[in-house]
Image (spheres, rainbow, N blue to C red):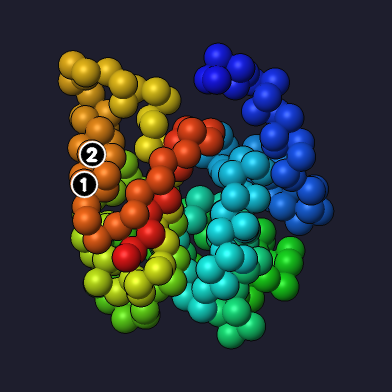
Amino acid sequence: MLEHFTKEIHDYCADHSVRHSDYLDRIEESTKANVYGAGMISSAYQGRLLSMLSHLVNPRRVLEIGTFTGYSALCMAEGLTADGKVISIERNKSLKPIIDQHLSWTPLGQQVEVLYGEAHLVIPQLTAAWDMVFVDAAKKQYGLYVDLIIDQLRPGGLIIADNVLWRGKVLEEDSEDDRTLAMQQFNDRMHGDERLQPFLLPIRDGIFILRKK
């Protein structure tokens, strides 16, 4: 019953899912201490979900749209093949020094390549066949990102979209907020896309898992 899904239950689930990692804990602390908008970092609970999905897929190529400070990229790198790589796109080049520092704190950082620029301009230049894609960038561009990568996503591959509940605002029927409307339209479109198997999880701010048929 949903009424029993309290914050305490959420915390219980997180406590029984998260095993602390020295370098990830350190990245979280560094982000909170040094970066404006630190709340955008993936939570440890969400990071474990990304790691679990990556281990299940065992991807050779992961595309991340929105690096921020590198936390989620490293979580997904945990499940890569030995020759695998996470290609991560970040629009804010001022984050490069802290991203480079964070990636240097673990050997997994050698399997993460960060490209700087606008994702909708960078993605068409990439020729990899993607096994897994994580979308956590400009909310009004989510539909465009899917359009740009869907043909290069292998059958059985995953698209994982973050923040799809948009602080619960997706329930507002008469919203005039552009980002809320964009997220509502994205969710409706993904649910109706016959190329994809959709599963929306109420984790943190909502995570849409979409499997390409």
Query: Is residue 141 in view?
Result: no
In the picture, measured across the screen, residue 34 lies left or right of residue 16, that is: left
- What residue is rendered at 26% in x and 47% in y? 190
- What residue is rendered at 60% in x and 79% in y? 81
Say which of 33 and 2 sits in front. Answer: 2
Crowding at label 2, few (<14), some or many (≥20) Cα neighbours within 10 Å?
Answer: few
- Three-letter amino acid code at the position of disc 1: Gly
Quarter of the figure that contains the N terminus = top right
163 vs 3: above or below: below
Quarter of the figure that contains the C terminus = bottom left
Q: Where is residue 208 in the image (x, y as percent from the top left)?
A: 40, 45
- What residue is rendered at 35% in x and 72% in y? 155
Q: Which mark is residue 77?
A: none
User: Which residue was labeled with disc 1?
Assistant: 192
Dot 1 falls on a residue whose secondary structure is helix
User: Which residue was labeled with disc 2?
Assistant: 188
In the picture, measured across the screen, residue 30 lies left or right of residue 64, that is: right
Q: Nearer the viewer, mark 2 or mark 1?
A: 1
Q: Position of residue 9 (x, y in %)?
A: 68, 24
Q: Position of residue 151 (x, y in %)?
A: 24, 72
The answer to the question of whether label 2 and label 1 lie on touching residues, with beta carbons closer than 8 A, is yes
Cα–Cα gap, marks 2 and 1: 6 Å
- What residue is rendered at 48% in x and 33% in y? 202
Q: Position of residue 125 (x, y in %)?
A: 27, 76
Query: Is residue 6 in view?
Result: yes
- Three-letter amino acid code at the position of disc 2: Asp
116 vs 27: above or below: below
Dot 2 falls on a residue whose secondary structure is helix
Crowding at label 1, few (<14), some or many (≥20) Cα neighbours within 10 Å?
Answer: few
